[in-house]
Image (cartoon, rainbow, N blue to C red):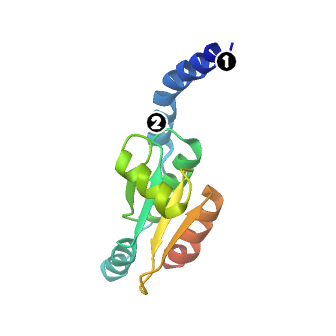
């Protein structure tokens, strides 16, 4: 019975994956507009950020939409298909759970922020006021 249930959910994910990706493309908001100097500051600040995600995870889609809305050039790392990124997430963050925002601080310390709402709130606090 258990293998049958797994097979069902794998098939369901295969069917829904394209739907999730198309819906993301159609509903992604336009980026905020900033002046050249303000955008350059945002670009520099985003160099120390990386989002670990699964491509079709709805919570990851939520974070990617907020990144797009804020116009942030954050590196997106696929922890589902790339074993190196998956290992980095497990070793650095302590668990393979997505979405996870890796925040490298100026003092060399690294923070791993989980949960889409917490990530979006942090992004909005950090970059939303410049919009």
Q: Specify the farthest residue to the right.
A: 1
In 3D space, how far apart are the residues under numbered discs 2 and 1 (Cα atoms)? 28 Å
Q: Is residue 85 visible?
A: yes
Front position among marks 2 and 1: 1
The local crowd at label 2, few if under 14, some if 14 to 19, many if 20 or more residues have their Cα within 10 Å, is some
Q: Is residue 30 visible?
A: no
Residue wearing tag 2: 21
Task: Out of 63 and 106, give the one closest to the viewer.
Answer: 106
Rendered residue at 37%/45% (across/down): 83
Residue 2, numbered label: 1
- Quadrant of the image occupied by residue 32: bottom left
Q: Secondary structure at mark 2?
A: helix
Where residue 82 appears, as percent x and y from the top left, is 36, 44
Where residue 28 appears, as percent x and y from the top left, is 48, 48
Mark 2 or mark 1: name the one nearer the start of the chain.
1
Rendered residue at 62%/67% (across/down): 121
Q: Specify the farthest residue to the bottom.
A: 107
Where residue 126 appears, as percent x and y from the top left, is 53, 76
């Amino acid at each position: 019975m258990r293998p049958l249930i797994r097979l069902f959910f794998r098939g369901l994910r295969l069917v829904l994956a394209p739907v999730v990706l198309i819906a993301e493309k159609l509903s992604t908001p336009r980026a905020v507009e900033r002046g050249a100097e303000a955008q350059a500051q945002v670009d520099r600040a985003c160099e120390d950020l990386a989002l670990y995600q699964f491509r079709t995870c709805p919570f990851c889609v939520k974070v990617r939409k907020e990144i797009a809305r804020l116009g942030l050039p954050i590196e997106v790392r696929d922890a589902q298909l790339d074993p190196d990124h998956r290992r980095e997430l497990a070793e650095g963050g302590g668990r393979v759970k997505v979405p996870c925002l890796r925040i490298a601080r100026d003092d060399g310390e690294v923070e791993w922020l989980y949960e889409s709402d917490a990530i979006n709130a942090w992004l909005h606090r950090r970059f939303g006021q410049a919009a």
